[in-house]
Amino acid sequence: MGSFIRRTAVAALAVSMAALPAANVYADDTMTFEEALQASYDTVPDTDNIQGWPQGPRVYGNSAIVMDMDSGAVLYAKKPDERHYPASITKLLTALVALENSKTDDEVYFSEDSVSFLEPGDASIGMTPGEILSMNDALYGMLLASANEVSYAIAESTGKLMGGDYNTFIQAMNDRAAELGCTGSHWMNANGLHDEQHYTTAHDMALIASAVYQFEEFRTVTQTLNYTIGPTNLVGESRTFQQNHKMLWEGGYYYYEYCTGGKTGYTDQSRTTLVTMADNGDMRLVAVLLQDDGDVYVDTRGMFDYAFSNFSKVSLKGQPKAEGVSSYLDDAPYVVLPTGIDFSSLESEITITDKREAEGKVTYFYKGQDVGSADVTLTPEYVKEEMGYDITPRITEKSGASADGPSGEEAGLPLVAKILIGAGAAVVVLAVTAFAVARCILVRKRRRRMARARRRQIHRHQSQYRRSHNYRDPDYRGDHHRGPDRRRNDQRHPERPGRYAAEGASRPSGRNKRR
């Protein structure tokens, strides 16, 4: 009953979120464009209000954020949870869901629906109904050229791979965003063309960008400057297009040496939006700007320079663990702190992700500001206190198994499993026994053959000695007394020795030789 009530409440919340218009997405109608632009620039970043936090740059974007992509630490924030229209940076979430539910060699089919919605001015690479691209080519078309019909076709084709259709993919976009911790987003399409119920926040986009950046395929695509899609099943000409993100073009005015990718966006309603990833060899950061009517690239550079200059990683290894934490699951867990702030001033919060395995996540805060998190193993006492679930017996059984024999879980195996295990053990024992017996027989046969060979060799030496000395043994009574297997042709016909009369030769054993 309780779970039903929770599911109902979640569904009701989702409906209410979808029904609400995106907050703060309209400019103040009482201001001129210049006044609104200046007012946005003059807005103090939220992080400037944190005691001891370095003062950040002013930017023209209405909302902005810089986040460490690996720890989730927020280094700079300006209205990070305010809703705005995303425009084409939507395609980062489209790429994430596609990469998680398809392979790069899957086919992307362009239906009539994937092309017919386009209007003059919409970004496109001129695909026609019935054409087919590989998912790999389609990702380049979507992320570099920002082609809207390609985004639709990716969503529709991946939706079919998921057992549904285009709408299945859109629902997956919303579900995946929620799983990542997005709290202010709602997605209506795969390309970002304007819809009043299609909106996001700077913080949500940072979470999405961090997730898709983990895919090597995405990193390869988003750093590419030029790409050519060859002839298709319907079109005999190639299509070549370029990277739109100006911070990636070396030698250009906006080039930024640490930039490793990103996505641009623009509609009349969203204004300019931009997501940019950067890596200086120490930290991997993402910067997001929403509704920016100034110079979005200058704003982005200023945010990155601020973050790289004022923050550094602090390893969690060697620091006191948060109460309830047993060990870290990450190889090199860390938080990101401003210069001059000590780890001892942080507070922590634990989220249990799997009570049965005693796993969770610890997040550290400085005066309420998220400075990083890490996956952890929790103590049994903490899990029991927080969840009422006692994992101590299971841990005891596991440790007892290593010291004293089978654990309680193994001792309590089903009868069928026990029979199979016993049968397997019996087969192994029989196989070992059979091998030992066979080896013993072979060794005995080999010894008998060697003994016979030695006797024949001794006899040959004796015979040769008699012939060379014209000697006859007193007991010798002629060939007809030797028996059929001891008659020798070599004694009666010395010039024609028998087949096995050569010195050191032996008769065949009767067994076939291995070839």
Image: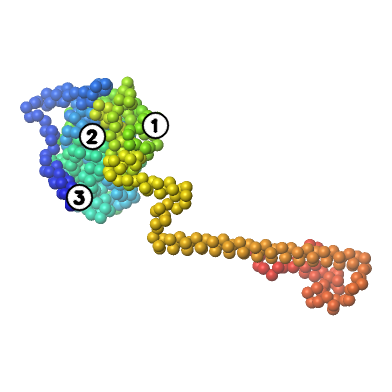
The quadrant of the image that shows the C terminus is bottom right
- Coloring basis for residues: rainbow
Q: Mark 1 or 3 closer to N-term?
A: 3
Q: Would you name the residue on which mark 1 appears?
A: 317
Three-letter code for the amino acid on which mark 3 is drawn: Ser
Image spot of residue 74 (x, y percent): 27, 30
286 versus 136 height, above or below: above
Q: Image check: 399 left or right of 131?
A: right
Q: Residue at x 34, y 36 (%)?
A: 325
Image spot of residue 435 (x, y percent): 59, 62
Q: Would you name the residue on which mark 3 appears?
A: 3
The answer to which quarter of the image holds residue 143 is top left
Question: Which one is in front, 241 or 58?
Answer: 58
Image spot of residue 451 (x, y percent): 75, 64
| Numbered badge on residue 203 | 2
Three-letter code for the amino acid on which mark 2 is drawn: His
| Marks 1/2: CA–CA distance | 28 Å
Does residue 473 show up? Answer: yes
